Every structure is written in C-alpha cells, then in structure tokens.
Image (spheres, rainbow, N blue to C red):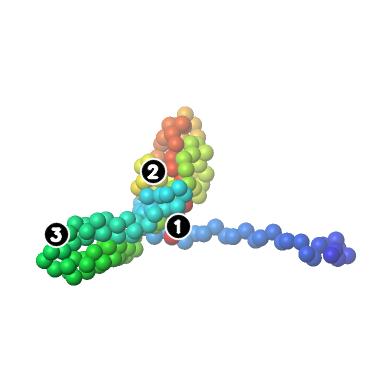
Amino acid sequence: MRTDDEVDLFSKVAPASEPEDERTPRGLTPGGWVRTTGWLQVGHHPVSSVLVAALVGLLGAVVVAAALVRADPVAAGVVVLLTPVACGGAWWLFTTRLKPASPARNLGTVPVGALSPGDHVRLHGSIGPVGQVVAVTVGEDVEVDFRGGTRRTWPGDHAVHRVQLLG
C-alpha cells in the first residue's frame, strides 16, 4: 500500500547500522595488546580454554583414580568427578580475574597490505596476543601501527591471521 508521497507502508526498513563496539577488551595490556584464549578451534568455532583445562584435569584424575581405586574406591570416584571441575574453575578464575584474557576466533589469513584500521590481528602466527590496527602504510615493506603505539614492519607478501574478539 502506497501513500500519496509514494512511500510503501509495508516495505522492510533497512536496519539501522549499529555503532562500532568500543568496549575495552578483557586482557588489554598497557602496550595495547590483548591477551587471548580460544586458540583451539573446530572449524570456525573456538573451543573454550576452560573445557581444555577440565579435560586435562580429567586425564590426570583418571590416572590418580586408577592408583587409588583399590585402596578407596569412593575417593577415586570423587577425584574423577571433582578434579575436572576444579581445573576448569581455576582456569576460568585465572583468565577472568588474575590474568584477564579475551576469547577470540581466528577468521583466516590476509596479506598484511590488505589490513584496514580497526582490524584485529594475531602478532605471532595463529595463536598469541592480538593487536588492533590503527594505520597501515604500504610501500616496499608494509608498516602497521597498532593501538598502544607499537609499530610492526612486514614484507608486503606476509600473511597475518585476522581475529574476532568475542568478549
């Protein structure tokens, strides 16, 4: 249905663009780098590092329980049940309170010359800290300025891992 001004009242309105999320990432260091978790991925889905810590705790608990089961089977069962929870909880506490880190998802590699301001990239291959690109200067080598004042220079054909910070 159209009005006199030729406006279709039943057409879908384009969604308003969301403002850029400028929250301070968890794990931001004074130098502008962001400590991250989520280096283990299945496809495009990061595996929580808390789950990895709990799995490692479970493996250790099974070994301890195997040695303990003949002497005290109840204690062996308690060890198997509580150790993964304790390990996952301790890792969660470490990565949220003691040494905060943001969960991250790798998005793939791009040539360093294709970076734009605002991109987040890993600095040391596919794992490790993340920097936010502030400026890119393309020449014989590509100079990338990061939030916090750090500058890295890479050859023009160097590829870096783009990252999405999840929290």
Kindly indicate whether the residue at mark 2 contacts the one at mark 1 (C-beta within 8 angstroms).
no
Residue 136 in sight in this render: no
Q: Which amino acid does label 1 sit on?
A: Leu
The residue drawn where x is 46% and y is 32% is 156
Q: Which mark is residue 166?
A: 1
**Considering the numbered disc 2 on the image, is that residue within a helix, a strand or a loop?**
loop
Asked if the residue at tag 3 contacts the one at tag 1, i.e. Cβ–Cβ closer than 8 Å, the answer is: no
Counting other residues with Cα less than 10 Å from the Cα at mark 3, is it few (<14), some (14-19), or many (20 or more)? few
Q: Quadrant of the N terminus?
A: bottom right
**Disc 1 packing (10 Å; few <14; some 14–19; many ≥20):** some
Q: Residue at x 14, y 68 (%)?
A: 72
Residue sticking out furthest to the bottom: 74
Camera-nearest residue between 111 and 82: 82
Which numbered dot is residue 59? Answer: none
The residue depicted at 40 percent of the width and 40 percent of the height is 152
* Mark 1 element type: loop
**Residue at the spot 42% in from the left edge and 49% down from the top edge:** 42
The image's mark for residue 126 is 2
